[in-house]
Amino acid sequence: MSQATVISETLVAWFAENARDLPWRRPGFSAWGTLVSEFMLQQTPVVRVIPRLEEWLSRWPTPAALAAEPAGEAVRAWQSLGYPRRALWLHASAVAIVERHGGVVPRAVDDLLALPGVGDYTARAVAAFAYGDRHPVVDTNIRRVIARAVAGQAEPGPPSARVDLVAMEALLPHDDVAARAFNGAIMELGAVVCTARAPRCDACPIAHACLWRTAGYPGFEGRRKAVQKKYEGSDRQVRGLVLGALRAHDDAVPAQAIAALWPDVEQLDRAVAGLLKDGLLVDTPAGYTLP
DNA sequence: AACGCGGGGAT
DNA sequence: ATCCCAGCGTT
């Protein structure tokens, strides 16, 4: 058997026994639910997403239900999941789904990619997980597992849709059902076992096939990612402060109240201007409101 | 290719 | 204090 076959067959069998019980894996979970969950999971950890997802789907069980409300309600319901532009994009996607797809989440990757906030990962995740179609899905977990098990390196190289999709395609079983399971299985391995910080290689079902292990777990050679800027005192924090004030009030917040949120006037102005440009904030005579 | 964009939990 | 998280759009 090829290494690819060993990996796919072993992980699918492992996943059948070890998959976490997550909302989007419940039988009968809707394609809309999958789309919402994938939006929320873009850079936000699973444990923080679950409660917001349940609330969201109970309030807006269909794209049409969300599309019928102002975008600001989506931003409000997003609470502190982070990157609130995603709430705006999800609302805009709901509108587009109603207008262009009769209220049904599209199945074709190209149609999904045309939705705002849907990129290479989310489009294929929805097509694969919601509709069971055979597509290579590549997220940060999968990139890491492939880097280690297949490339024998501690960390993946810089993201490249072209390179990453080809690498995943080479592992993906040809059968639709097996391919869907494998997408979930390898992602789960990266999330639970082959983690970024302290991989649990002793508990890894494919340790015997892992080239990183064979190579003696060499350290990372490539270019390090740029160090992330500090959040405290950042423009991001100020944006979050302003948006939090808007979320806490049903009606308009006067500019004066916004001004009291942050001492650095220049930085606050920059934050407000950015929020206005992003459409997360609207300037009205009574003050600022959500869209 | 690199950057901006949130916020919280783990180490 | 730093890293990481089921990424995306813009430059």
Image: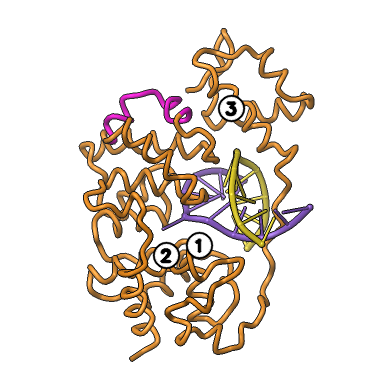
Chain colours: A orange, B yellow, C purple
Identify residue for label 3: A244
Identify residue for label 2: A188
Q: Position of residue A144 (x, y in %)?
A: 52, 70
Asked which secondary structure carries label 2, the reply is helix
Quadrant of res A264? top right
Q: Chain of mark 1?
A: A
Q: CA distance from mark 3 to mark 2?
A: 33 Å
Choose the circle earlier in sequence order: 1 or 2: 1
Q: Chain of mark 2?
A: A
The answer to whether marks 3 and 2 mark residues whose Cβ atoms lie closer than 8 Å is no
Magenta residues, start to end: A62-76
A116 vs A153, nearest the viewer = A153
Asked if labels 1 and 2 share a chain, the reply is yes
Choose the circle earlier in sequence order: 1 or 3: 1
Q: Chain of mark 3?
A: A
**Residue A276 got which mark?**
none
* Mark whose residue sits in front, 3 or 2: 2
B2 vs A40, nearest the viewer = A40
Q: Position of residue A207 (x, y in %)?
A: 48, 83
The quadrant of the image that shows the N terminus of chain A is: bottom left
Outermost bottom residue = A1
Identify residue for label 1: A140
Q: Chief secondary structure of the magenta span?
A: helix
Q: Position of residue A158 (x, y in %)?
A: 58, 66
Quadrant of res B6? top right
Q: Position of residue A167 (x, y in %)?
A: 43, 75
